[in-house]
Amino acid sequence: MERLLGITMMLLSRRRVNAQTLADKFEVSHRTIYRDLETINAAGIPIVSFTGSDGGYEIMEQYRIDRQIVTLDDLQSILAALKGVRASLDDEEMDGLLTKIKALVARSEQKQLEEAGDTLIFDTNLWHGGGIKDRTILAQLRQASKNRTVVSFAYTNTDGEAEQREVEPIGLAWKGYAWYLYAYCRLRGDYRTFRLSRLDGLRVHMERFANRGVRMEELDARWGNQERGPEIELTLLFRPRLRVRVEETFGADRVEVREDGSLLVRASYPNNHWLYGMILGYGADVQVLEPAAVAARIRTVGAQIAAIYEGAETDAAVT
């Protein structure tokens, strides 16, 4: 029954699916898939088959599934996710969608939903909150992506260098703790990801662009080409007092507690600016054991920071 329901939901969410895809997804033979499709069809859900290179199976276009297959718990999860996205986008369309989802709840269940309250909060805003400017940029870029409208902005990279970009926006993605724009960059002649916090002077143009045939899912699969960079193996040694923080950051399974209480961590991270900022954030409570090149760079940056304040103590004493 679980497999039959899973196949039905896949067919409802996609235009057409072939037998091989279904067999791989549910780890069964083609024969089992054919038998399952016959069972679903016999249950009153009309499945149509197509032959040829683009062949496969799909549910008849006019068919719609009854809301009863979606439980009250399912609706609560959907509402929680939508509320979180609305908090960032501040989009009127989201308000309308929330109203429609709530309308699916039967009157007998509405009181139960109200009494239960929210058991899950999904909020893409940081603790310090998102300003009106952030929400405005998100709304503008989302609309430009839907309308296929060219946008331009000044973009600052991790080295602090600003450059004017003109792009064809594809969509927005929330990654880790930040919003990113997926777009075709006319300056680079390829697809790029742009962190929204580094955008300035956003302009939405009247020019529309043709669909290049690349989907968000494809871009997401090659996520991080210019943001992450190549990964390196790190060995870090932390002071005992940081145990809670280290276990929260790296995971308790990666933390080796030594006899003296110090904490040994082995992890892989992209070799970029974020890595050195993360290590320096622990101050004198961490030591980079490997690789030597990372340790040398941390030592150099530490010396540069110390040089900035060398005269500060003397000046303060004189004052």
Image (cartoon, rainbow, N blue to C red):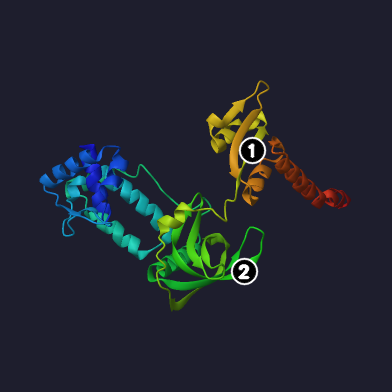
Mark 1: amino acid: Leu
Q: Looking at the picture, does residue 212 appear above or below residue 271?
A: below
State left or right for residue 176 relative to residue 60: right
Under circle 2, the secondary element is: strand
Above or below residue 278? Residue 237 is: above
User: Front-most of 202 and 151?
Assistant: 151
The circle drawn on residue 163 is 2
Q: Residue 105: x, y in percent?
A: 21, 50
- Mark 1 is surrounded, within 10 Å at the Cα level, by few (under 14), some (14 to 19) or many (20 or more) other residues, namely some
Comparing 73 with 228, the one in front is: 228
| Foreground of the two, 204 or 20 | 20
Residue 85 falls in image quadrant: bottom left
85 or 62, nearer to the observer:
62
Query: Which quadrant: the N terminus?
Result: top left
- Give the farthest residue toward the bottom: 206
Q: Residue furthest right?
A: 318
Of marks 1 and 2, which one's residue comes earlier in the chain? Answer: 2
In the rendered structure, the answer to whether residue 86 lies left or right of residue 305 reads left
Give the residue drawn at x 62%, y 61%.
Answer: 157
Q: Which percent across, then down, holds residue 174?
A: 46, 54
Q: What's under tag 2, amino acid-wise? A: Glu
Which residue corresponds to mark 1?
Answer: 234
Residue at the location (69% across, 39% down)?
291
Numbered tag placed on residue 120 in the rendering? none
Q: Is residue 71 visible?
A: no
